[in-house]
Image (cartoon, rainbow, N blue to C red):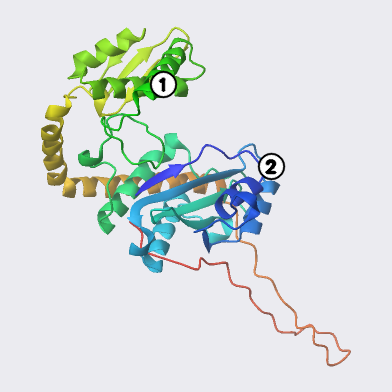
Amino acid sequence: MIVKFFRRGKGSGVGPINYLLVAKGGKPREGAKVLYGDPKLTEQLINATPFKQKYKAGVLSFTEDAKEFTDEQKKDNMQRFEDTLFTELEPDQYDILWVEHTDKGGRLELNFVIPCQELRSGKRLQPFYAGADLVRVNAFKNIINQEYGLTDPNDPERKRLINPYVNNAPRPTPYDRPPKSKEKEQEKEDNEIIAKPESTFALKAAIDRRMRHRLAEGSLNGRSSVLYALEGMGLTIKRATNSSISVAHPAMTRNVRLKGTIYEKDFKALSQQAHLIEGRQGDYERTSESRGHRDLKTWTTGMEIKKEYHEKLYGDIKAPEPLALVNNHVTSKEPQDNAPKVEVPTPQRSYSGPRP
């Protein structure tokens, strides 16, 4: 399982809601199922939010088939994720919509949309900020993957040669090559992008495609050949660490960081790659228990920090007093001062589960 947060969040509420529930042509999206929340309410809260960042959306994405999960397991994952984001906040302080998707292969996706407003005070709510929350969220992901025995994206066996590929696409191999004519067209296009890139994203994608092509040709056999290939593209090597290579481009104001196995210091040619992965796999499995303890400690520490942050922002905001509902059934003209009062309970989640 991996946790993704999408970049969008500044438009009206109809955008994310339609993405989750509506297919092209206005028909209901196949395989979409509301697990918790009210789509209309979430849309209205997003539209009423006065802040620039109106909502935060993302997904818990699993490689496993949706049929492998019970409803209780889905609820457990959802609740523990909410605990991780909204540490110590009460259910009436935030709104969240959960929608289940299954792709053509049957994989489970638990999508969420959160209006960026604390509901008691109307203050800004920031569910996720990478600089402060990424480490804690990653620890949550690792705990869930280990506890449920899910596919681990950190497993060396699943590590990608180049990062990133297209989201959710199967991991390609150097042998997944297009026809020669298509290769020539792509090479020309990539060279034009590298010469005059419009953005860092486009530049990185073009570099990755060229490096993947060279790997398939067999011209890359280690770190030195990778550096030589990058310099041949007109790039200047600025930094080479154990896990990445940073390059400079004349048209870019900032260095471009390239990540993935192919850019690592101990990258070897494909003939040696299987042996290298096998060694990493053994090391990874041997440290499973210690990594589990480290993730739990990281998560617990992060929760304390998030708790203090929320208390500082919303600690003085009290829950509204329960409404006093007066029985309006009048049997006489006498004043109804002694009419019975009915307490309205504080909103509760319809699911619960143990925390990491």
Of the numbered discs 1 and 2, the one sitting upstream in the chain is 2
**Which element is circle 2 on?**
loop
Identify the mark at residue 186; answer none if there is no mark.
1
Residues at discs 1 and 2 in contact (Cβ within 8 Å): no
Other residues around mark 2 within 10 Å, as few (<14) / some (14–19) / many (≥20): some
Asked which quadrant contains residue 27, the reply is: bottom right
Q: Which residue is mark 2?
A: 50
Where the C terminus falls, by quadrant?
Answer: bottom left
Judge by depth and name the residue closer to the eye, 300 or 337.
300
Percent position of residue 286, x then y? 12, 45
| Residue 307 makes an appearance in the image | no
Residue type for callout 2 = Pro
Percent position of residue 53, x then y? 60, 38
Tell me which residue sits at (66%, 58%) in the image. 40
Q: Would you place residue 234 above or below residue 215 in this image? A: above
**Which element is circle 1 on?**
helix
Percent position of residue 171, x then y? 31, 38
Identify the mark at residue 1; answer none if there is no mark.
none
Residue 281 is left or right of residue 306, and the answer is left
Judge by depth and name the residue closer to the eye, 215 or 300.
215
Residue type for callout 1 = Gln
| Residue 105 makes an appearance in the image | yes
